[in-house]
Each structure stands twice: as C-alpha cells, then as structure tokens.
C-alpha cells in the first residue's frame, strides 16, 4: 500500500484561529504545548499567520500532541493520534482562568480606549 503523509499541526484549534486571522480577524491561541520541536514549530506557524501566541505555555513534562493524516492509494484518509499524555491535556483550570482574566482586561481596556476616542 502506498501512503503519503501530512503532519497536521495543532489539531482543530490552530486551524480555526489561523482561518480567523486569514479572514482579517484578530486571533490568539491559548494553550499548553510540549517544549519540543513540534510545539515550537506550531508557534512559528501561528506567528506566520498573524495569530497571537503570547498565551502559550511550553511544558517540559509532556510532548506536543500530533495527528498524522495518511492519504491511502484509494483516496481515503486514515488518522493516527499521538497524544497520551500530551501537554494540552495538562492545561489546568487555574491556567485557563488566568488566560481569560488577562483577555478580559485587554478587551475591556481596548473597548474603553475606543469609546473615549469617539
């Protein structure tokens, strides 16, 4: 069987924020990645696509999740997931609360600035 392999970075979350940025929206990726080559490569891809990556945590204790999509000779796709445990599974509620608190402050500040300029 002949296979061609494609590395899909960051799973669905990164695809969505990249699409938002490409459509002209402001986009940020919030999460935890492994402190490995794949995690750093994902951040570079996000930056190349104008996605804010300031809220990404690099974690030494687990790898970045990977999904391999194989296109078989018959045209069907097959997926292989490498992620137990992966860094994104280890993101804690406290870390998310801090991210969203900072996001709320940034949005509120930007909203106040634009209101006072009117």
Image (cartoon, rainbow, N blue to C red):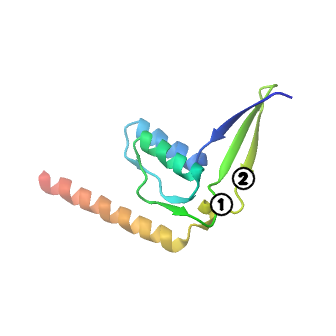
> Residue at the spot x=21%, y=60% of the render?
112
> Residue at the spot x=37%, y=46% of the render?
26
> What residue is disc 1 on?
86
In the image: residue 94, left or right of residue 83? left
Q: Where residue 79 appears, x then y in whole percent?
A: 75, 42
For residue 82, which numbered disc appears in the image?
2
Q: Where residue 49 appears, x then y in whole percent?
A: 43, 39
Tell which of 13 and 9 is nearer to you: 9
In the image: residue 58, left or right of residue 4? left
Q: In this picture, is 45 found above or below 111?
A: above
Q: Where residue 50 appears, x then y in whole percent?
A: 39, 42
Q: Secondary structure at mark 2?
A: strand
Corner quadrant of residue 106: bottom left
Corner quadrant of residue 86: bottom right
Q: Quadrant of the N terminus?
A: top right
Q: Do the residues bearing badges 1 and 2 touch, measured as CB atoms within 8 Å?
A: yes
Gap in Å between the C-alphas at discs 1 and 2? 8 Å
Q: In this picture, is 94 found above or below 106?
A: below
Q: Where residue 5 appears, x then y in whole percent?
A: 71, 34
The answer to whether one can see residue 74 in this image is yes
Tell which of 76 and 60 is nearer to you: 60
């Amino acid at each position: 069987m002949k296979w061609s392999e494609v590395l899909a970075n960051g799973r669905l979350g990164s695809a969505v924020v990249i699409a938002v940025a490409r459509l002209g929206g402001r986009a940020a990726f919030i999460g935890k990645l492994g402190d490995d080559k794949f995690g750093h490569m994902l951040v570079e891809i996000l930056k190349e696509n104008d996605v804010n990556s300031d809220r990404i945590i690099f974690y030494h204790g687990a790898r970045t999740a990977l999904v391999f999509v194989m296109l078989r000779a018959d045209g069907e796709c097959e997926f292989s997931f490498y992620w137990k445990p992966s860094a994104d599974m280890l993101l804690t509620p406290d870390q998310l609360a801090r991210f969203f608190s900072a996001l709320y402050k940034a949005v509120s500040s930007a909203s106040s600035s634009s209101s006072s300029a009117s």
